[in-house]
Image: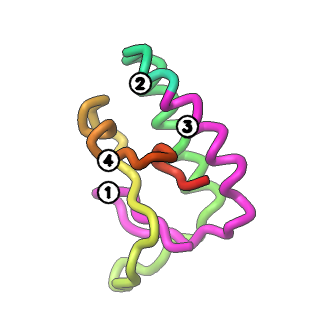
Amino acid sequence: MIVRIMGEGQVKLADSHFAELNELDDVLLKEMDSGDGPGFRTTLHALLDKVRELGTPLPDDSLEPSELILPAPGATLEEVRAMLGDDGLIPS
């Protein structure tokens, strides 16, 4: 799956990693629901770091269609909330 982190670029990520990413996504949703700003920020960075760690960066000149778009590291709680689908940021 091709994943875009807004403002950074794209990575290719194996489907086998999505269970691990979903765990972080679930924590992020709970923190957003409770209004835990510091927890939200920490978990968002952990989620993006994990995508960068597990994914293989695509060349900057590559324009593959992104199957998943994640917020930039500096995104606010409100901006991320606007991006959420029924399953959070990461589809189940």
Estimate the spatial distance between the alpha carbons at disc 4 and disc 3, rounded to whole Å.
18 Å
> Which range of residues does the magenta coloring cover?
1-29
Mark 1 lies on residue: 6
13 drawn magenta: yes
Residue visible at 47% across and 66% down? 3
Q: Secondary structure at mark 3?
A: helix
Q: Tell us which disc is closer to us: 3 or 2.
A: 2
- Quarter assignment of residue 35: top left
Q: Secondary structure at mark 4?
A: helix
**In the drawing, what numbered circle is on residue 83?**
4
N-terminal of the pair, mark 2 or mark 1, is 1
Question: Looking at the picture, how far across and down is residue 86, in whole percent?
Answer: 45, 46
Disc on the earlier residue, 1 or 3? 1
Q: Earlier in the sequence, mark 4 or mark 3?
A: 3
Residue furthest out toward the right: 16
Q: Residue at x 53, y 51 (%)?
A: 90
Name the quarter where the N terminus is drawn.
bottom right
Q: CA distance from mark 2 to mark 1?
A: 19 Å
Residue 32 tag number: 2
Q: Nearer the viewer, mark 2 or mark 1?
A: 2
| Rendered location of residue 16, percent (x, y) | 74, 63
- Going by the image, does 26 lie left or right of 75? right
1 or 4: tag closer to the N-terminus = 1
- Is residue 47 rendered to the left or right of residue 6? right
